[in-house]
C-alpha cells in the first residue's frame, strides 16, 4: 500500500522515507511526564527550537493536560499558554506546528498564529465548532479515539476487540470529516493509546498497529513515556525513554507514519540507523 500524503495548511508531509517524528511541546504545569518543565512561553519556545534542530518533523504544542484524571483548563488560560508559543515557534522554525487542543477557539487562534495542524483528542467531536474551524482555516487535522474524557476514561475501559472497534470508529470519523468537507488528504488518525484503554488494550494496539494503515490515512501514535511502558519494564518509576524508543522502532517497522514523542534526538537516530541498515 503506498504511503499517504498528509496535506497541512501550507505544506505536505510525505512518509516515503519513514515516519515523521512529532516533538512534544507541553506548556502545562501538570502533564504526566514533563509538566512544569516548559511552562513559560520562552522555555517552551526554546524547547521547541531544540527539538526542531534535533530532527522533529512536527512540533505539537499543548496547553491542557489530558493525562488520566486531569482537570480541564479554561479557554482563556489555554490561549494564554499556547498562543505566544505558537507565534514564537512559527517565527523561529521551518517545521509545521500542531496545536493539541479540543477547543475550537484555541484551534482557530493557534492556526491564525502560525499552526498548520489541529490535533484533537476528541476526534473533532468534543467541540461542535471544531470541524468548521478546520474547514475555514484549511489546517490539517488529526482525529484521535478516546473512550470517555480524561476525568473518567481510565475508570473501567471495556471493548470486545479493541483494535477492530477503534478501527471502525476511525473509519467512521474519517467518513464524517470528509462528508463535512475536509479533504481526505488533510486527515490523520490516532488510535489513542492510553486514552480509555487498559494495559492489555494498549499492548494489543501496538501489536496490531498495522491494521490502522488500512484506513488509508496517515496514522499517528502517541506512546511516549506512557504507563504501559513502565508496566512492561516492571517498574513504574523507571525512566521510560528507552522503552519508548523500543516501541517507536517497532511501530516504524509496522509502517506507522507519525510518532509523537518527548525524546526526539534518540528517536531520530534510532530510526536513521534502522533505515540505513535495511536499505544498505
Image (cartoon, rainbow, N blue to C red):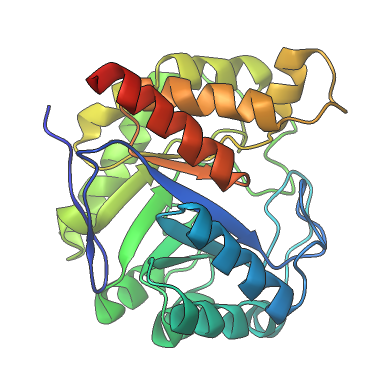
Where residue 265 sits, quadrant-wise, is: top right
| Residue at position x 71%, y 34% in the image | 154
The reply to whether residue 88 is visible in this rendering is yes
Query: Front-most of 91 and 219?
Result: 91
Where residue 252 sits in the image (x, y, percent)?
38, 27
| Residue at position x 34%, y 38% in the image | 19
Where residue 20 sits in the image (x, y, percent)?
37, 45
Q: Determine whether 102 is above or below 109 in the image.
A: above
Looking at the figure, which quarter contains the N terminus? top left
Check the image and name the residue furthest to the right: 237
Query: Is 24 left, or right, of 96 in this rendering?
Result: right
Where residue 234 sits in the image (x, y, percent)?
81, 12
The reply to whether residue 110 is visible in this rendering is no
| Residue at position x 44%, y 35% in the image | 191
Looking at the figure, which quarter contains the C terminus? top left
Where residue 84 sits, quadrant-wise, is: bottom right
| Residue at position x 79%, y 47% in the image | 69
Q: Determine whether 24 is above or below 33 in the image.
A: below
Q: Determine whether 55 is above or below 245 in the image.
A: below
Amino acid at each position: 500500500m503506498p504511503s499517504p500524503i498528509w496535506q497541512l495548511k501550507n505544506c505536505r508531509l510525505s512518509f516515503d522515507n519513514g515516519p515523521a517524528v512529532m516533538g512534544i511541546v507541553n506548556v502545562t504545569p501538570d502533564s504526566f511526564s514533563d509538566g512544569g518543565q516548559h511552562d513559560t512561553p520562552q522555555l517552551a519556545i526554546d524547547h521547541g527550537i531544540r527539538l526542531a534542530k534535533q530532527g522533529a518533523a512536527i512540533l505539537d504544542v499543548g496547553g491542557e493536560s489530558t493525562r488520566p484524571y486531569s482537570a480541564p483548563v479554561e479557554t482563556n488560560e489555554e490561549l494564554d499558554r499556547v498562543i505566544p508559543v505558537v507565534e514564537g515557534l512559527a517565527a523561529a522554525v521551518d517545521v509545521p506546528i500542531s496545536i493539541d487542543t479540543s477547543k475550537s477557539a484555541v484551534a482557530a487562534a493557534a492556526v491564525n498564529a502560525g499552526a498548520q495542524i489541529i490535533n484533537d483528542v476528541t476526534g473533532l467531536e468534543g467541540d461542535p465548532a471544531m470541524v468548521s474551524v478546520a474547514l475555514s482555516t484549511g489546517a490539517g487535522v488529526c482525529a484521535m479515539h478516546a473512550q470517555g474524557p480524561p476525568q473518567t476514561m481510565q475508570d473501567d475501559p471495556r471493548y470486545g476487540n479493541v483494535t477492530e472497534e477503534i478501527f471502525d470508529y476511525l473509519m467512521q470519523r474519517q467518513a464524517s470529516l470528509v462528508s463535512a468537507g475536509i479533504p481526505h488528504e488533510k486527515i490523520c488518525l490516532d488510535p489513542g493509546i492510553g486514552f480509555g484503554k487498559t494495559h492489555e488494550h494498549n499492548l494489543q494496539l501496538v501489536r496490531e498497529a498495522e491494521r490502522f494503515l488500512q484506513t488509508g490515512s496517515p496514522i499517528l501514535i502517541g506512546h511516549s513515556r506512557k504507563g504501559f511502558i513502565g508496566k512492561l519494564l516492571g517498574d513504574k518509576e523507571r525512566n521510560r525513554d528507552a522503552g519508548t524508543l523500543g516501541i517507536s522502532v517497532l511501530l516504524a517497522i509496522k509502517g506507522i507514519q507519525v510518532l509523537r514523542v518527548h525524546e526526539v534526538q534518540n528517536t531520530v537516530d534510532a530510526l536513521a540507523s534502522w533505515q540505513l541498515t535495511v536499505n544498505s
